[in-house]
Image (spheres, grey):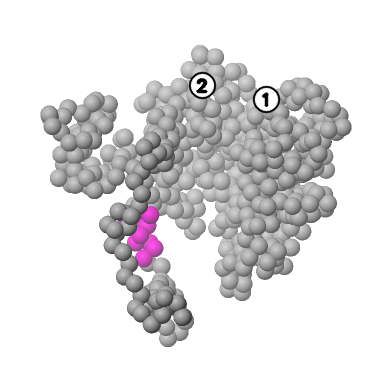
Amino acid sequence: MEALVSTVSRSCPFLAKTPVKTLRRLSTLPAALPAGHPAPAPRNALLASAQKCPVMGTALAVQSSRAISTSAKCPFAAAVDAAVPIVGPPGAAAGFGAEPPMPNPPAFVNGPSAGRAPAAKPAAAAVAAAKPAAFAGAFDYEAFYQTELDKKHKDKSYRYFNNINRLAQLFPTAHTGTGEHVTVWCSNDYLGMSRHSLVTENMKATLDKYGAGAGGTRNIAGNAQLHLSLERELADLHKKPAALVFSSCFVANDATLSTLGSKLPGCVIFSDASNHASMIQGIRHSGAPKKIFRHNDLAHLEELLQSVDINTPKIIAFESVYSMSGSIGHIKEIAALARKYNAITFLDEVHAVGMYGRTGAGVAEYIDAMDEIDIITGTLGKAYGVVGGYIAASAPLVDMIRSYAPGFIFTTSLPPVVVSGALTSIRYLKTSQAERSAQQLHTRDLKGRLDALGIPVVPNPSHIVPVLVGDAETAKSVSDELLYKYQIYVQSINFPTVARGEERLRITPTPGHTAELADVLVDALSTIWRERGLKTVEDWAAVGGNAGVGTGQRVEQLVKLEDIEIPAGYVPSHESVTVSASA
């Protein structure tokens, strides 16, 4: 609420002079209404006060309470849109690009209307009157939609999208819908490749040569040389015979798991409890029986494997880096269990490709386990900075998915300009260590500094910095305060992405997050934790711990210091590079 008030109080005298505590209290009190007040009644005293305002009252009267707030209504965004010119061919009229008027439909030749003017459209009132009256007890669709939304609001899991416009030349800075500059600390553009000059210049050249779109599915005009080159590059990256590119890795995971699970006779799928929604969706769509093992619990996985006949086809689906906790899957150990129990492995490396390994092939490359995995999936939209997803596996498996998966067959292929950018980024990161090294060093420094202050970082060995809050409403409020008071954007993560009670801020340092930017973030978090009395590591330890915080666990980073190319003169901002889960 503080963030909202600070934004609009200059325009509203009532908000400017009313303390935040009073506003908060009014929002929880029932509205005191005079007799005969027309229905519907305002939900609380704050809304009742707003209805008395000559400005807000008028706005509320004409705006449905169900209206959705969207960035499309932002005046600053509209101004930006208006500043983009509509470019036409030489000599085109000023109105080039405007939508032409719709022509009148032709009269039917030899039909009853031939030779006559088109019939006038019936008035709206007449159309409404012609509609049949609602059946008694008929299903109210709109009420159902609103009820589902109300559930989200009630449990504080409703998602609000911030208007964040990342500025390529000022990475990691963005501007908000009002034009204010903020530092983005939660982007999945982990290495800043979306604005790398090699990537953008190649994309511009490709755009000029091949245009904006792909022209169709891979089967119909959408299979260009760039797509084939990208798939060869990805196969080489993961040392697999073949690869297949999809519109996103959500689609890649869904299409591959659903196709394999439905085609393999009697297939049973074993899924880590923390797997991404795309994998869960693919397993569900496959119709295959599933067995869920506790996150990273090898003993539980083996117990479940033992319950299925050795000759039954089996898939073990898991991830390398789990993006909300930062934990890392037991790749070699799961591969060994797969061999022991006649299963194949499906490894999602979405949050690891570009980030780990000598060529950026992921955690499996870093620990020398790529040849032990049957299917690797990855994204082009995170560390590689563009968009798209893919699988890499044996040639027959990839060809079967290409031939049977609806999510691949019936989707327009990635535009050549996107493929060009991805191809450039992959090739660059195969040889450059600078971005990976800087990202790893900045992550180590930030984790060490927060740990020294007792700010509860969920312990993990990866590049993710999850700061535990433990309450949905508080996490959203802290995110808002960081944005509006400190010009720092860190998105809060709530249920169902994480379990209730484990709500958090998810921070992702990049090569562009300098020590000076880290100073601002650490100072802001320290101040917020102190002023709000939020739980520190010691506080979580006193109640038995939560999400790994306060349990006495200490976790070393996966990437060792000796594997990082440390620039000359580099001095860590804090000597600790180990995240502690205890006081």
| Neighbours of disc 1 within 10 Å: few (<14), some (14-19), many (20+) | few
Residue name at image x 46 percent, y 51 percent? 173
The label number, if any, that marks residue 537 in the structure image: 2
Residue at coordinates 83% horizontally, 33% vertically from top-left?
312
Q: Toward the viewer: 18 or 70?
A: 70
Chief SS of the magenta region: helix
**Eye-nearest disc, 1 or 2:** 1
Q: Residue at label 1? A: 294
Q: Amino acid under label 2?
A: Val
Q: Nearer the viewer, residue 60 or 209?
A: 60
Q: Which class describes the residues within 10 Å of circle 2: few (<14), some (14-19), or many (20+)?
A: many
Q: Which label's residue is closer to the chain start, 1 or 2?
A: 1
Q: Nearer the viewer, residue 74 or 69?
A: 69
Pinpoint residue 58: horizontal percent, then vertical percent: 19, 47
Residue at image location 74% in from the left, 55% down from the top: 402
Residue at 12% x, 29% y: name it. 35
Say which element carries label 2. helix
Q: Residue at the far bottom: name it.
A: 91
Q: Is residue 336 left or right of residue 203?
A: right
Residue 76 lies in magenta, yes or no? yes
Residue 48, labelled with which disc? none
Span highlighted in magenta in the image:
72-82
Q: Position of residue 109 (x, y in %)?
A: 46, 80
Q: Is residue 131 above or below residue 224?
A: above
Q: Is residue 384 visible?
A: no
What is the C-alpha distance between the residues marked 1 and 2? 25 Å
Q: Quadrant of the C terminus?
A: top right
Q: Amino acid at mark 1?
A: Arg
Residue 528 on image: x %, y %: 39, 30
